[in-house]
Image (cartoon, rainbow, N blue to C red):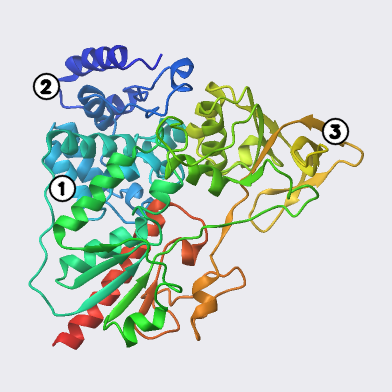
Amino acid sequence: MHDRSTLDAQAKTYLASLEGKELKNKERAAIPSQDMPSQDAGKRIRNMEEVAQGYTEAQARLESMRCLQCRTAPCIKGCPVAIDIPRFIKHAENGDFAASLAVIKESSLLPAICGRVCPQETQCQETCTLGKMHKDVSKAVSIGRIERYVADLEMERGEAVMPEAAPSTGKKVAVVGSGPAGITAAADLRKAGHEVTLLEAFHKPGGVLVYGIPEFRLPKAIVEQEINNLKKMGVALKTNFLVGRTRKLRDLIEEDGYDAVFIGSGAGLPKFMHIEGENLVGVLSANEYLTRSNLMKAYDEENADTPIIRSKVVAVLGGGNVAMDAARTAVRLGAAKVYIVYRRTEKEMPARVEEVAHAKEEGVEFLLLQSPKRILGDEKQHVRAMEVLSYRLGEPDDSGRRRPVVIEGSEREIPVDTVIVSIGNDSNPLLEKTTDGLLVNKWGNIIINEEDCSTSIDRVYAGGDIVLGAATVILAMGQGRKAAESINARLAREHD
């Protein structure tokens, strides 16, 4: 049962039984983990509203009481931006949510976003002592859900406190891309007193947060508020500005007078399988499908000008969060049947456990240990079916996961009218092609000095997916922060 009022009543009753007690670790460990209130699956598949509805105050405090306040704080080591997790949770336990959020903001500028989309179960929660005591990571303290609660509370109350910018240094910095890495870098650079301009290729800022993640997982109003916060700090924003086309990268420094450039443009070039039939009508990348739905709001037929394919039977190829987003979007757009086709087992799936569970609740069918051999078309070159092969797992590959091995003679056809490919992204080669001397690796990712995020070009720094490949929001933020620190240090030396 995930009904919000029911869960709140249960939490309040349990909380009342603990008030005034000095809890020992054994008693804290016995407190049940709090389920996330969520929309009923039968209702949510007919709307784009957020599925996870967020903790109530009683739930947030009760979940916080489960924290053992370990001296070693392994959760901090598991956080890519090293938030002081025990300290922010202790404030939440005491009901001082403003103080709790203040601790988070010492390290992270996007708590409402990270609390929703970061894979805590493979980061801070994976190392949680409580989870290890229970021998089950799902029993760890729900750090991300508490983080979301305190961040949302600030927004609801309209109490957002903007960081103050230091006195002007007279220095100018360009930030390419307004996704998680760019937002984080821009804020830290502006706080240091520099004149900062965000350069965004799309007509709306936010990067992957607005074009990649659906409304039902991350409401766009939250991203918009974070962008507005940057503007209030004095960060300038230029949209429809494609670096490499609108202006060359070197021109920003040599002609436009920027003292440094941070590249946080992400990895938005979709990979395909290179199999027969991928050129048929009805085959598209998850990037295109989600961008049309999320950024262009194509799901809103009455008000949107952007068309989107209306499918009956959809096959989504891949097992990551983007694949789950595409499959769940297809359900909401009216598909009668949606498959996730993945060549390993559910255990090897990179998608978050919560997203897989939500997809199953919404009727998505998982075809595991299967992968397409070819896509079949009709006389009009429209997708009519997909031929798949079955696999078994062999020895581990370079990723540490067991390698899928084809079972010969296992071909079978699955009738589908749409195939959405979601097997990862590469970096857009535009910057590499238009910038002499910019070093990239074989995948097109910009090569940086790990110590300071500097590139092969003087005064140019990079971070996020353009460096890491498709990674996570919090990892991109971590690199944005490191790069900003390096730029600030350099410009401070030059200012002196």
Position of 312 with respect to 111 (left or right) is right
Vertical placement of 426 versus 315: above or below?
below
Q: Name the residue: 17% across, 33% down.
A: 156
In the rendered picture of this protein, how many numbered marks are placed on residues? 3
Position of 355 with respect to 481 (left or right) is right
Secondary structure state at the residue bearing disc 1:
helix
Q: Could you classify mark 3 by the number of other residues whose Cα lies within 10 Å: few (under 14), some (14-19), or many (20 or more)?
A: few
The tag on residue 20 is: 2
The image position of residue 181, as x and y in percent, is 36, 60
Front-most of residues 137 and 143: 143
Quarter placement of the C terminus: bottom left
The image position of residue 344, as x and y in percent, is 70, 41
Q: Which residue is mark 1?
A: 102
Vertical placement of 41 versus 125: above or below?
above
Quarter placement of the N terminus: top left
Label 1 sits on what residue type? Ala
Separation of residues labelled 1 and 3 (CA atoms): 56 Å
Residue 446 visible in the picture? no
Q: Could you classify mark 1 by the number of other residues whose Cα lies within 10 Å: few (under 14), some (14-19), or many (20 or more)?
A: some
Front-most of residues 34 and 352: 352
Position of 78 with respect to 26 (left or right) is right
The image position of residue 286, as x and y in percent, is 57, 45
Label 2 sits on what residue type? Gly
Q: Which residue is mark 3?
A: 412
